[in-house]
Structure formats: C-alpha cells, structure tokens
Image (tube, rainbow, N blue to C red):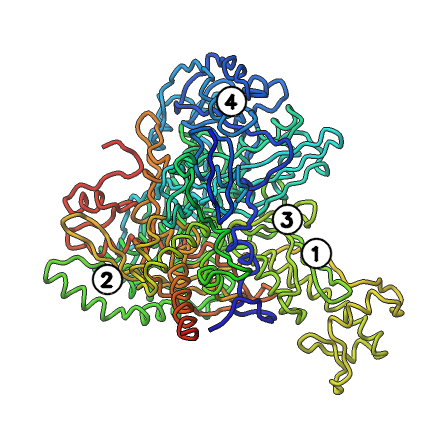
C-alpha cells in the first residue's frame, strides 16, 4: 500500500507492507537513522518521535496509521543550523553517554518544555519515565532539561 | 549562559564531549545504521527448549520463500568445520546446534533474505523435530549424581563440573576460624542479571569475493581481540579481516564475547557473496547473550567480640550456563573474585569456586563487574553487615574499625593483591558527613518508635582494574597490553589512534585531553581514532574499567615520546643543546631565557621541513608505544543509601544515595560523574528489580523489558556525589579507572539499607532483587528464592 508521511516537513511516499512499523518506515524508507529501535514492547522509548505534535513510540505505530500525518524526528530539532536548546542542554550537562536513547529522550524533553516551560525535577522525571537510559542514571538528563528550560526563559526575557 | 561551541580547552578538567556533536543530532553511526549496496538480512531460529535432542530440521518451506536466498543449519556448518567456535575460556560453543540444544534461545538455523521482515517470516517456516530432555536449571542440582549431562559433546565429560579453583591459605584460615570468638555464616546469592544495553548485538559482514577481505561492522568492545578470534575460528588470514566497531549503544561487558549471530553474518556473506546484516531483537538479546553473576556463595566471617574482623572463608558455586564462555584473564576462572577480602585488614582468607554447567545461556563475566569484583564486594559487604547484626554494632563504625589504614599502602592482601594506594577512612568519613549519618540514625530511631521502616545502608568497596600485567594476564593467550600511536601533523594538529573502544565513556574526548595535557595542544585539535582494526594499534579493548588504566597510560607515554622528540627538533631549531631546554606548557624553551622557545606547533612544522636534524633523528613527529601495566589500579569508594520501606506492600523507595568515589586523578570530572551516576542506577536496579529467572523447564522468565525490569527515572534518586583523590603511584597520570566502580559498590549499599530497615523483624539476610514481594515475604517470615520460579 502507498503511504505518505510528512517527516520534518518533507513528504515521504513509499509503497509499504501494511504491517510495516513506523520506526522502520522512518529508518529504512525515509533513511533517517537518528530514530532508534530498542525493545519491541514499548518499554525503552529509543524510538520516540512526534506524530502530529505528540510524542509516540514509533515501534508501536504502523506506518499506515501515520499516512497523511506529520512526524517530527530528532533530525528535525535543529532549525536553520541552530541546535534546539534541549540538544544544547544535553551537551552542556552530559545528558548522554552512548547516545542510543538520546533521540527519544530529546523528543520527549522538547514536548515537555513546549507544554510546561518551567518543569520541576519531579515533572521532568515523570515525563521521561516511559523511557530507559542505561548509562546516565537519569540525573544529567534531568539537569539537561532544566538547562534548556532556563535557557529558553532567559532568551525570552531578552527578546521580550 | 554558556554556549555549546567548543571552547578552547587544553588538558584535564570539565570540557564538553566531542562525541555529542553528532549524537544529539541523530547522526551517530550504530551497526544497525550501516547500509551497504546489495546488503541482505539474516535472522536466527532459536530453540524453544532448554534441553532437547534435534532429530531433524526441515528447511524446505523456508527455502521456498520467494525472498529467501539461503537457509543455513548446523549440518551445513559441520561440513565447513564451523559448527563450533572457541569461547574466551578455552571451551567451545555451538554456532548452530547440531546434536542438541542446551538452553532456551540457542541458535539453530540462520535465514538470509532480501529484507529483515522476510527473513523473520522464513524463520517461522523452519520445522525442527525436537526430543525434549531433562533440564538442569538449578546450579545446586547440576552436580547431583543423577543430573543429566549437558556437555556430552565433550570427550570425557561425564558430569556438569567445569572447574575447581581456590585462593588464599586454607590451613591458616581454618586456624583463625577455629580460635575466633565469633563466627557467622550466611548463604548469599548474587542472582543472574543481564547488562541489557539499549542497543542489542548485531553485525554487518562484507566479504569481498575478489580480494578475499572481510569487513565486519559489529557491536564489539574489543575489535582487535575479535579479529584474532575470527582468524582462529574461521581460518581466515588475520590481515584480511577488518573489524569496525562504530558507535556502540552501550556495552557494559555484554559486547566483549563473540556470538553465533556475528559468525553467521560472516558465513552468510561468504555463502551469498553479498553483505549480510544480522541484528537481534530484544528477546533474543536477553535470552542468548552474555548474562552476569549467578554466583551462589556461602560466606563465613570470623571476628573478635568487640568487632575486629579476623578472617573470611567463602565457598562459591558458579553457574556458567551451557558453555563456559566467560570473558576474563585465562589464569583466573573465577575472574578477580579473590579480591573478596575487600577493604579490610585481615589475618587470613580463603575461597573455593566450583564452576558448573546448566541449561542456561552462557556468559557470567559481564555487566560492569570488573571480572567478578561485583560478586566479591557484595559478599564481603553483606558479611560485614551480617556480623554487625550479630554483634549489634553500627555498620559504619564496624567498617571504620577494620579498614586498611593509609599508612599500610601499598597493601598486600591475603589473596595476593597489591593495593596501590588509598585513604579509606577519609572516604568513609566524607560519605558519613555528607549523609549526616548521626542525624539519620536519630531519625531512624524515631521512626522505629512509630513503627515506620527506614534503613541506612553502608558499603565500602575496593576495585581492581586495568588488566593487566602481561606476565599474569592474558585472554586466549593474548597478553593484556594496549598500543597507542600519535602523529602530529605539520600544522600542529594531532591524530591519536588507540586500541580501546568507547561505548559511551567518551574516549574521543578524554583521550584527547590526555594528549592535550602532555603536549599543550587544544583538545579541539586532537582527533581520536578508535574502533577500526585497520586504523588502530593492537590491544584488548574496553572492559573491566581498563581503558584509562591501560590505554590512557599508553596515550600519556606516547605523548611523552613525542615531547622528547620535539625537544631534539627544538634544539636544532634554536641551535642549543637539548640539555639547555625545559618544557613549559606547550613549548620547549631555553632555561633562563624563556623568550627563546618553540611551541609544539612550530616544532611540528619544523620536523616536517628541510631543517637539518641531528644524526640519527628521523623527521616528522610521530610515535608509537605499547603499555604493559606493572600492576592493576585500585579505585575505591564509600557509599551510603537511605531507603523507606512500605510495611503494607514491601515497596522500597530509595530516598537518598551518597557516593564518595576515589578513582585517582580525574581527567574529565563531568565524565567521571556520569560514569558513577550510571553505575548507581545499576545498583538500584540489581538490588530491587533486575533478575533473570528460570522455571524448572529452563524457560527464561525475563525475555522482555516487561519481564526484566530496569530502573527508570522514577526509581532513581538524585545522586549525591563526593570525591577524594589518591593518585595511583604507578600510573603515568595517576588515574585509576572508574567505569565500573559504582556498579560494583552500589548494589550492597541498597540491600544493606533495606535489611537495615527491616531489622526489627529479625531478618538478617535476603537475596536480591528485593522486590516488593520479596520484602513483604521477608517481613512475614517467608524469605523466597529469587533466581528460580520454584518454591
């Protein structure tokens, strides 16, 4: 079946099997390999992308279900050659080690800050609790998100 | 507000990671990201039985699948002499089973198809006639007279016994125990767990049919060792094998060994003449790749009535699974378990370890264990708390009384380790001060009055990392030394080539910092090349916290060679004697006339120029070295965990975790802290959640992340870190290695805290994982065995 998904602003049309998972559409058909696959059971969250603006685990969505819809992946975070503050935050606060969970963590973090620009530590921990990281013990991910929140707040002050 | 542009930085200290520039953009290159023209996809058929005879395999339906190119079984491999491969412990392991399967999830057949989905479909079309056999899932039953023999493939193997090993002086230890005022014994299990990196294992094999050169992209922590083993297994000439380990999504020891899937991708590429990718799924990963621990220990501790510890005696039954595939120095079949005397000054110690086969996946030495030091530290730290329980002593005070004192270093233990340096009481005192130990005890007393359960767990650990001295340590005959090559380009930029392989530890950053520290070059000007056997010097790879102790030393020394050569070049440039020069920051300058000097960049250009150099001095500015460590390094730390236990549910909440680590000189404190954070989360996971259990039929009960529970952001507290710095006296930069310290030290702190909380219920010991069910059972007088789903 033919499926068209707008990924990071670019329409991707491919003839796919109905059972093809969105994560495989993104990786194999659209060739965007920043979105990772890690568990098959929706536990690890390395595959988190946005579907119509909301984070989803793309291993649990069929590509066909995303037909005609918009997907944003980690490759879509950087805008006009400028990193998203959450990407900067992860670099600044050592929020990643092996980097495998990072794309999913970044997408969830961006969604959190869009909904709640000033999250508490507890709110950040709850937001990322559906995802696993085996390297960081989560501490620096929390700090990274806080760093991004503060950066965005200070940027807004300057522009206001 | 700082920016993420790389700031000019030289040498040690906090600096941002070079790796992150690609990783935060989703531009990493992991094995599953590798795409080669014409690439095919492989999938493995795995055994549903833990122990069964294979009567026949019918692959015809799979072969008839329109997108399938080949189906390979053990019979096919037998013809090629590849049905079995050597393990890292001088055993053999089936690549694809021929005679029988020996654990659930074992590899039986390999399908190669045009795409991944079709390969998986075709796997389902293979019909295997299995004849189930009696199963041994319990290490304690493996040596029973009537136990089925798992390894009947091995000539002369008539039972499930693998090895007996001992360390320490038995007679001396028995004498100490015979005369001791107090002797306490406890059975302690370190259950089977799995490292579960988020990236599973996989490989892409590309055998060029014209040149005969094999390129293997693979999830390997030890690319050079893997290349040598492939040369031995397949008889491929070693110079025709290139192993590339690209970005690795976590390893933790799981990616040290060689798995049948890797070998099958190679065979697949040879058979089809095309590149073949194999990437396992999560269930395959948890069921078949290297597990960790599974140590059944009986500890005995001897002491005086006032709490002076005199001796330790340990008997271990080690479950190695169906093939002995532990990855550790050859002479030590129990790894470094004999460091079990820990951080204490004892009169005598002795241990025996017996290894047995069971119908479970192979492995054992994995998961940031520093070659079984996790088990050793857990044992001794649990035993000290058991002693404290019996003596009604405070566990922190009891430790303080028995720690090796600073003036005793270098300290030789009763099992032969020479601890290089340490100030243990200082670290423990700092942890107690950070925790507010006395106040916590007061709070606990008040809560006990009210019937609330709060626990304070203390653990102290000594690690032994940086294997190791070649005369003592090898793997499959390969000495554990590591090479480094450093080249300074004419414009003063540098490329460092190292043998170790980061899986997230940040080598591209920290190794550049080591070079920067020695030569005064900005970190940004130093490229670190690793993970490619065609581009890097030989060495045994990254595990056992050995990268900084071994390869980091090699890097410092190769940079010093460059500095020495630069001195001669500078002397020619300045027309002075080398003896008149002194090194300052990033330049050689004339003693007493610092205006006269040449920077390393100026020297690099001159070294490549027409400048006349002294007789015997070659041009250019590059050097190589091989570092053979004189001893291991011995990081240590003091950990304190505070928990609250819910009496009604048995649920444990880790409220605080204080970790004081001493890993010698810290190259990049940010990265060191990150390493510690990750290990502490491991400790919470192993203590409270993680276990790979089996039922009586050998069914694996933890084959997904819904069954094998890993800690999330909600189970982990905000870690409180402290540090002391005791440099290693024999390491060129005084560093000790830290990658596994927290995984080694933290599980016992959490367990000790939970048992401290439920002490009023008369519980002296309970085994990990302390799930709500296990804790509730312990509170209600029903301690349960956690490694088997058998009452």
Subunit bearing disc 2: B
Reading the image, the residue beneath label 2 is B393
The residue at 25%/48% (across/down) is B765
Which of the numbered marks, if any, corresponds to residue B485? Answer: 1
Query: Which sits earlier in the primary sequence, circle 2 or circle 3?
Result: 2
Which of the numbered marks, if any, corresponds to residue A64? Answer: none
Label 4 in the same subunit as label 2 = yes
Query: Which sits earlier in the primary sequence, circle 4 or circle 3?
Result: 4
Query: Which sits earlier in the primary sequence, circle 1 or circle 4?
Result: 4
Which of the numbered marks, if any, corresponds to residue B109? Answer: 4
Camera-side residue of B28 and B607: B28
Q: Nearer the viewer, mark 1 or mark 3?
A: 1
Q: Nearer the viewer, mark 1 or mark 4?
A: 4
Q: Is residue A31 above or below residue B156?
A: below
Reading the image, the residue beneath label 3 is B539
SS at circle 4: strand
Task: Check contact, mark 1 vs mark 2: CB within 8 A.
Answer: no
Q: CA distance from mark 1 to mark 2?
A: 54 Å
Q: Is residue B669 above or below residue B413?
A: below
Q: Position of residue B229 (x, y in %)?
A: 62, 36
């Amino acid at each position: 079946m033919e499926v068209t998904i707008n990924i990071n602003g670019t329409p991707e049309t491919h003839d796919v099997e109905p059972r093809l998972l969105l994560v495989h559409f993104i990786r194999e058909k659209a060739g965007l390999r920043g979105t990772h696959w890690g568990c098959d059971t929706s536990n690890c969250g390395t595959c988190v992308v946005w579907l119509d603006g909301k984070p989803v685990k793309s291993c649990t969505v069929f590509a066909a279900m995303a037909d005609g819809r918009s997907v944003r992946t980690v490759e879509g975070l950087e805008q006009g050659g400028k990193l998203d503050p959450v990407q900067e935050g992860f670099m600044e606060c050592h929020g990643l080690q092996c980097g495998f969970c990072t794309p999913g963590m970044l997408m969830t973090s961006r969604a959190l800050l869009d909904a709640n620009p000033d999250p508490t530590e507890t709110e950040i921990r709850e937001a990322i609790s559906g995802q696993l990281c085996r390297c960081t013990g989560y501490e620096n991910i929390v700090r990274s998100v806080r760093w991004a929140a503060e950066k965005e707040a200070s940027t807004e002050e300057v522009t206001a | 507000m700082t920016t993420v542009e790389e700031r000019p930085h030289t040498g040690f200290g906090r600096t941002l990671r070079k790796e992150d520039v690609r990783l935060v953009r989703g531009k990493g290159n992991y094995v599953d990201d590798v795409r080669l023209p014409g690439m095919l996809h492989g999938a493995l058929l795995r055994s549903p039985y833990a122990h069964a005879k294979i009567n026949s395999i019918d692959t015809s339906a799979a072969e008839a699948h329109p997108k399938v190119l080949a189906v390979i079984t053990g019979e096919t491999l037998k013809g090629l002499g590849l049905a079995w491969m050597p393990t890292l412990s001088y055993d053999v392991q089936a690549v694809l089973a021929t005679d029988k399967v020996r654990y659930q999830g074992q590899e039986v057949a390999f399908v190669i198809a045009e795409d991944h989905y079709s390969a998986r479909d075709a796997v389902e079309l293979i019909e295997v006639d299995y004849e189930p056999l009696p199963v041994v899932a319990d290490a304690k039953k493996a040596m029973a007279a009537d136990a089925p023999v798992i390894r009947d493939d091995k000539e002369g193997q008539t039972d499930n016994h693998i090895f007996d090993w001992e360390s320490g002086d038995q007679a001396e230890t028995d004498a100490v125990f015979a005369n001791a005022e107090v002797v306490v014994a406890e059975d302690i299990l370190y259950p089977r767990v799995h490292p579960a990196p988020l990236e599973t294992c996989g490989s892409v094999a590309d055998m060029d049919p014209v040149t005969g050169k094999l390129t293997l992209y693979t999830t390997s922590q030890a690319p050079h060792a893997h290349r040598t083993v492939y040369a031995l297994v397949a008889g491929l000439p070693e110079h025709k094998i290139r192993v590339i380990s690209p970005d690795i999504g976590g390893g933790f020891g799981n990616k040290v060994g060689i798995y049948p899937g890797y070998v099958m991708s190679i065979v697949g590429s040879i058979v089809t003449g095309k590149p073949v990718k194999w990437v396992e799924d999560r269930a395959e990963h948890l069921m078949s790749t290297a597990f960790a621990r599974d140590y059944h220990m009986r500890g005995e501790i001897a002491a005086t009535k006032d709490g002076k510890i005199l001796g330790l005696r340990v008997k271990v039954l080690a479950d190695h699974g169906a093939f002995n595939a532990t990855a550790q120095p050859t002479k030590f079949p129990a790894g470094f378990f004999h460091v079990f005397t820990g951080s204490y000054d004892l009169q005598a110690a002795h241990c025996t370890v017996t290894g047995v086969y069971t119908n479970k996946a192979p492995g054992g030495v994995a998961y940031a264990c520093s070659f079984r030091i996790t088990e050793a530290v857990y044992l001794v730290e649990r035993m000290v708390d058991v002693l404290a329980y019996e003596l009604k002593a405070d566990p922190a005070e009891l430790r303080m009384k028995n720690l090796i004192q600073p003036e005793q270093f270098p300290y030789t233990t009763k099992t032969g380790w020479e601890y290089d340096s340490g100030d243990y009481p200082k670290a423990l005192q700092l942890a107690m001060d950070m925790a507010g130990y006395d106040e916590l005890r007061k709070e606990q007393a008040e809560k006990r009055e009210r019937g609330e359960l709060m626990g304070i767990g203390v653990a102290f650990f000594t690690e032994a990392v940086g294997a190791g001295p070649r005369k003592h340590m090898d793997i499959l005959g390969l000495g554990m030394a590591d090479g480094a090559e450093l080249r300074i380009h004419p414009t003063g930029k540098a490329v460092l080539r190292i043998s170790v392989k980061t899986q997230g530890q940040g080598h591209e950053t920290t190794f550049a910092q080591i070079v920067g520290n020695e030569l005064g070059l900005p970190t940004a000007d130093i490229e670190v090349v690793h993970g490619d056997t065609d581009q890097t010097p030989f060495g045994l790879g990254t595990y056992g916290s050995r990268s900084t102790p071994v390869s980091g030393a090699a890097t410092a020394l190769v940079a010093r060679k460059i500095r020495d050569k630069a001195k001669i070049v500078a002397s020619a440039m300045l027309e002075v004697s080398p003896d008149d020069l002194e090194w300052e920051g990033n330049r050689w300058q004339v003693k007493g006339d610092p205006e006269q000097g040449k920077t390393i960049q100026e020297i690099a250009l001159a070294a490549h120029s027409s400048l006349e150099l002294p007789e015997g001095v070659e041009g250019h500015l590059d050097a190589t070295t091989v570092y053979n460590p004189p001893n291991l390094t011995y990081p240590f730390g003091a950990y304190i965990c505070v928990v609250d236990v819910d009496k009604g549910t048995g649920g444990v909440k880790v409220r605080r975790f204080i970790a004081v680590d001493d890993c010698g000189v810290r190259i990049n404190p940010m990265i060191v802290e990150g390493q510690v954070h990750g290990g502490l989360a491991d400790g919470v996971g192993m203590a409270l959640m993680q276990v790979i259990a089996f039922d009586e039929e050998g069914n694996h009960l933890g084959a997904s992340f819904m069954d094998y529970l890993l800690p999330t952001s909600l189970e982990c507290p905000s870690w409180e870190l402290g540090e002391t710095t005791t440099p290693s006296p024999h390491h060129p930069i005084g560093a000790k290695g830290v990658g596994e310290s927290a995984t080694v030290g933290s599980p016992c702190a959490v367990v000790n805290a939970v048992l401290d909380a439920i002490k009023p219920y008369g519980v002296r010991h309970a085994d990990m994982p302390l799930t709500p069910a296990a804790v509730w059972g312990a509170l209600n007088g029903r301690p349960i065995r956690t490694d088997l789903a058998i009452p």
